[in-house]
Structure formats: C-alpha cells, structure tokens
Image (cartoon, rainbow, N blue to C red):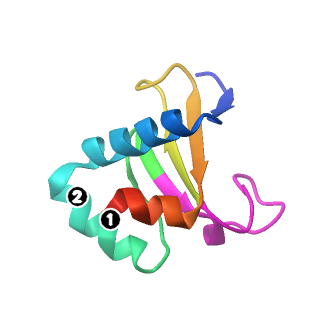
Amino acid sequence: MSEEVFIIEEFSEKVELMRLYYKIIGDRKFMEAIENFKNKQGFGIDPVCCIFANEYQPGEEGYFGENGVNFSIQPPMSEVEENAIVDENVFFQYLT
C-alpha cells in the first residue's frame, strides 16, 4: 500500500469528502459519531475517519495544527490517503 498522503486544498473538494464521510458512516453510526463529536473526539469506520486537532500533540505523527477537524479517506476508497482539514465552524455547519 502506498504511503502517499494528499491534502485537499479546494473548498468544494473538502465539502465533497465531508459529505462522503457522512454517507459512509450512515444513519446507524451517526448517533455514535455525535456522542464523540460533542466531546471533540473523532470517529471513523474503515475507510473514513474524522479527527479533531486536540487529539494530537505538536510533533506527533498526524498533527495538523492546534485547531480544526481533519476528514480522511483511505484506500481502497481512494488511490492514496486523502485529508481535508476544515475549521470547526465549517465542521459544525456541515454537521447540521
């Protein structure tokens, strides 16, 4: 498997990945995800996840800054790992 990671920069592509995340976790796992989100804890099921910035420390692998939420999709749903980092306001806007 490739170790390559792609960071999505285009806002519309970030939104697309967030929507795909919610579609994949589906209604059955959504309430479990909400329980995590209210405590600023991420949630995922293969091949997608979302992680809050506070879950990492500077210098730790995966650290992406002090604020925000990282949506990620892994192979085989994508050719390489793709990450879309959004601020928490955008996260909550698309959560509702």
Secondary element under disc 1, as helix, strand or loop, is helix
The quarter of the picture where the C terminus appears is: bottom left
Residue 9: give x, y in percent of width and height. Answer: 65, 36
Residue 57: give x, y in percent of width and height. Answer: 75, 69
- Dot 2 alpha-carbon crowd within 10 angstroms: few under 14, some 14 to 19, many 20 or more: some
Residue 54: give x, y in percent of width and height. Answer: 64, 72
| In-front residue for pair 78/7 | 7
Left/right of residue 80 with respect to residue 39 in the rendered view: right
- Identify the residue shown where x is 84% and y is 60%: 59
Residue 67, located in which quarter of the rendered image? bottom right
Residue 31: give x, y in percent of width and height. Answer: 22, 67
Left/right of residue 74 with respect to residue 21 in the rendered view: right
| Residue located beneath label 2 in the image | 29
In magenta, the rendered stretch is: 50-68
Contact flag, marks 1 and 2 (Cβ < 8 Å): yes
| Residue located beneath label 1 in the image | 33
What's the amino acid at mark 2? Lys
- Dot 1 alpha-carbon crowd within 10 angstroms: few under 14, some 14 to 19, many 20 or more: some
Asked if residue 90 lies in the magenta stretch, the reply is no
- Residue at the extreme left of the image, as rendered: 28
The secondary structure that dominates the magenta segment is: loop
- Residue at the extreme top of the image, as rendered: 79
- Residue at the extreme bottom of the image, as rendered: 39
What's the amino acid at mark 1? Ala
- Residue at the extreme right of the image, as rendered: 59
Asked if residue 58 lies in the magenta stretch, the reply is yes
Task: Measure how far apart labels 1 and 2 are at the Cα level.
Answer: 6 Å
- Identify the residue shown where x is 40% and y is 26%: 77
Look at the picture and state if 35 lies above or below 7. below
Residue 24, located in which quarter of the rendered image? top left
